């Protein structure tokens, strides 16, 4: 039996279960783990056709996307939003712990 690379296996899971991808991203964003976010975004990029396809959908230069998704990448909000939009997702703000925001 051929071993699959972890990123390939995760990409396949995200492709087959978009709700799992959303849950994973939301959990990472809640924890605030930048390194984990970059790993997951790379896996999602693979799930959505690779860097070339996502870059085209996000209207980004593929080289810029490679740099953005690198282990030291730190995407600006506009790029992160464009990448997620290319994958059919978006960033959203919600109340912490399901409570209404205080005025």
Image: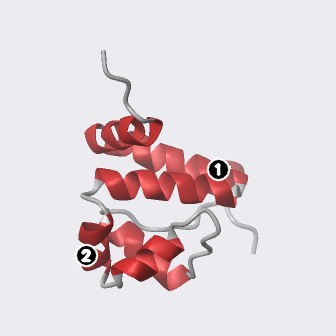
User: Residue drawn at (44%, 42%), measured in percent from left and top?
Assistant: 7
Helix, strand or loop at label 1? It is: helix
Helix, strand or loop at label 2? It is: helix
Residue neighbourhood size for the residue with mark 2, other residues' Cα within 10 Å, grouped as few (<14), some (14–19), many (≥20): some
User: Residue drawn at (29%, 60%), measured in percent from left and top?
Assistant: 50
- Relative to 8, say whether 99 is above or below: below
Marks 2 and 1 sit apart, C-alpha to C-alpha, by 33 Å
Q: Quadrant of the C terminus?
A: bottom right
- The reply to whether residue 64 is in sight is yes
- Relative to 101, say whether 20 is above or below: above
Residue indicated by mark 2:
57
The number of numbered badges drawn on the structure is: 2
Observer-nearest of 13 and 8: 8
Q: Nearer the viewer, mark 2 or mark 1?
A: 2
Residue neighbourhood size for the residue with mark 1, other residues' Cα within 10 Å, grouped as few (<14), some (14–19), many (≥20): few
| Residue 85 location (% of width, % of height) | 34, 71
Answer with the quarter of the image where residue 66 lies. bottom left
Taking the image as shown, residue 19 lies to the left or right of residue 67, namely left
Q: Quadrant of the N terminus?
A: top left
Residue indicated by mark 1:
98
Colour scheme shown: secondary structure
């Amino acid at each position: 039996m051929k071993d699959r690379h972890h990123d390939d296996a995760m990409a396949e899971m995200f492709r087959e279960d978009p709700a799992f991808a959303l849950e994973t991203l939301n959990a990472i964003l809640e924890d605030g783990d930048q390194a984990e976010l970059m790993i997951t975004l790379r896996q999602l990029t693979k799930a959505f056709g690779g860097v070339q396809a996502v870059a085209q959908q996000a209207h980004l230069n593929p080289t810029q996307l490679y740099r953005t998704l690198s282990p030291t990448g730190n995407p600006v909000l506009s790029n992160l939003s464009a990448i997620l939009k290319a994958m059919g997702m978006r960033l959203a703000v919600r109340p912490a712990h399901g409570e209404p925001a205080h005025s």
